[in-house]
Amino acid sequence: MDMLINGTAAPAADESWIDVKNPATGEYIDHVPRGSVADVDAAVDAAEDAFGSWSEKTMRDRGLILSRAADLVRRDHKDLAHLLTREQGKPLRESIDEVRGCANILEYYASIAGQPAGEAVHLGKAGDCLVTRVPLGVCGAIIPWNMPVIIMGWKVGPALLAGNTLVLKPASTTPLTNLRIGRLFLEAGLPAGALNIVTGPGESVGEALVRQARVKKISFTGNCETGHKIQKIAGDQLKALTLELGGSDPMIVMADADIPKAVEGALRGRFYNAGQVCTAVKRLYLHEQIAPEFMHLITVKVEAMKIGNGLLPETDMGPLNSQSQRDRITTVVTDINDREEGKILTGGSPVTGNDYANGFFYQPTLISDVSPDAAVLKKEIFGPVLPMVTVPDLRTAIREANRSRYGLGASVWTRDLSTVKEVFQNVHAGIIWVNRHLTIPPEVPFGGTNESGIGRENGFHALDSYTQTKTLFLGW
Ligand code: NDP
C-alpha cells in the first residue's frame, strides 16, 4: 500500500480526512486520510504479500536497505525536522536531534545485520539440534505524538531487519513526518508492502490493527490506559506485545553532586520537548543540604527560558502538542493549588499574549515544598511542570523514588560510588543514569518495569523480540 499525503493548501472539506495543524500557531499544515478498518485489512494484505520475498532476503540485504534509508533521512534531515516542528511544536534543534537519532537507529540495525547467530546443541547419541531465529510475520506499530520520528526508528529498524513486514499507525496530530520517512524507505529500495502506514483515529484504526488476527505482534508506545486495552485484546489472540507506557522518572540529587551540572540535567530532563517525554524528569528529590542552592539556580535558569514557536532560533521551549495536553497540565497545577500540595516558585499558568494566542503554550513551572505524600507525585506529568521534594538522606530518596506505579528510568547525581550502588540495586527502573538523564542509545535495551510496560526497544533485545526460535532436531 502506498502512503498518502495530500499536500494541498486548504483544510479538508469533509470527515474522511484529518487536518494536521501547527500547535504553536493553529496554522493548517496538511490533511491525511481518516483510515478505516478496511484500510487496515488492505494494509495487512499488502504486508502479507510482501512477507515472503522480504523474509527470504539475507539479513545483510535487508540491512543494506535500512542503511540507504538512514542516508536518505540524513540527506533530508532539515526538511524533515522543519515538518516535525510544524506538526509537533518542539524547537527546531530538538527536531534535528530527533531526525538524526532516527537515522542513527536505522544505521545501528544495518550495522548488526549478519551478527545474530543461531545455536547448535549437541545431544550425544540422540542427535544434534540447530536453533535458528525466524521472523514473526506481519507486525503492527502504534506511534505516539511526542517523539514520533525516533519511536518510528525504534520499531521499524528491528522489525524490518528481522525479516518482518509492518503496518504502522502514526498519531493523528503528528502523521506527516512519519509519512515522509515512509516514502524515503521506498526510495531506499524497500519493496512495496513491506512497510505500510495507515493514518486514522486510534480508537478505530489503532484498535483494528490490534484486533487483526493476522498481525503477529504489536509494538505500542503511548498512555497506560490504551496499553491496558491493547493487552486485553492481544491476550485473547496470544499476540506478542511490546508496550512502552510512560513513566514518572525520579531524579535524586545528593549533597556531594556537581550542582550546576545537576541543574542543567534537570532543566534538559524536564523541559526538553516541553516535558512531553516518557523518560523526562518528573519528580526531583533534593538532599536537604543542597536543596536551597539548587532551587535558586534552577529558578533563575527557568525564568530565562524563551518560550515560543519552535521555528524561531531563540526558542528554548515550544508549545504542548494539543489543547487536550495543555488541559491536562492545567488540571495538574490547579489540583496542586487546590490541595495545597506545594508552592509555585515560577510559572503555573498558560502563556498569554498575542504571539501565543493560537498555540498551546504553558509556562515552565517549578513547584517546591512538595510533600512526599502529594497526589501529584503519583501521576505522570506529561508537560513542563517539575515538583521538587526535599529529602534528609539517600534511604528516604530511594524509598520515595519507588512510590510510583511506574518504573521506566531514574537518575542519581553524586560523586560517590556507594550511592550509585544503592540506587542501582534498589530503585525500580529499566535504566538508571548516573550524572545524566534522558539519553537512550540505540545499542542498549530500553523499557520499563511495573506500569511502564513490558518488553524492550533497542539493541539485540528488540531484534530478538521480532523473532521466534525454530529448531531443527537431527536424530542420527
Ligand atoms: P494514546 O495512548 O491515546 O496515543 C498513542 C497512540 O495510540 C496514538 O497513535 C493513538 O492514536 C493510538 N491509540 C489511541 N487509542 C487507541 C486504541 N484504543 N487502540 C490502539 N491505538 C490507540 O496517548 P494520548 O495521545 O492520549 O496521550 C495521553 C497521555 O499518554 C500523555 O499525557 C502521556 O501521559 C501518555 N503518553 C506517553 C507516551 C510515552 O512516550 N510513553 C507518549 C504519548 C503519550 P490517535 O493519535 O489517533 O489517538
Image (cartoon, helix red, strand yellow):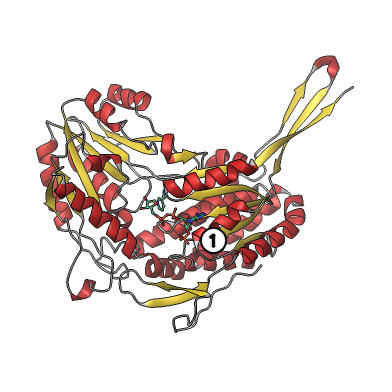
Secondary structure under badge 1? helix
Q: Is residue 4 left or right of residue 102?
A: right
Q: Position of residue 87 (x, y in %)?
A: 40, 68
Q: Quadrant of the image for the N terminus?
A: bottom right
**In the rendered image of this protein, does residue 220 appear above or below residue 388?**
below
Q: Position of residue 278 (x, y in %)?
A: 38, 47
Mark 1 vs ligand 1: CB below 8 Å: no
Could one spot residue 459 in this view of the protein? yes
Q: Quadrant of the image for the C terminus?
A: top right
**In the rendered image of this protein, does residue 92 appear above or below residue 255?**
below
Q: Position of residue 197 (x, y in %)?
A: 58, 63
Please tell me in which quarter of the rendered image ligand 1 is found: bottom left
Which residue matches tag 1? 204
Q: Position of residue 19 (x, y in %)?
A: 44, 74
Instruction: Identify the residue shown where x is 31% and y is 54%.
Output: 272
Amino acid carrying mark 1 in the image:
Ser
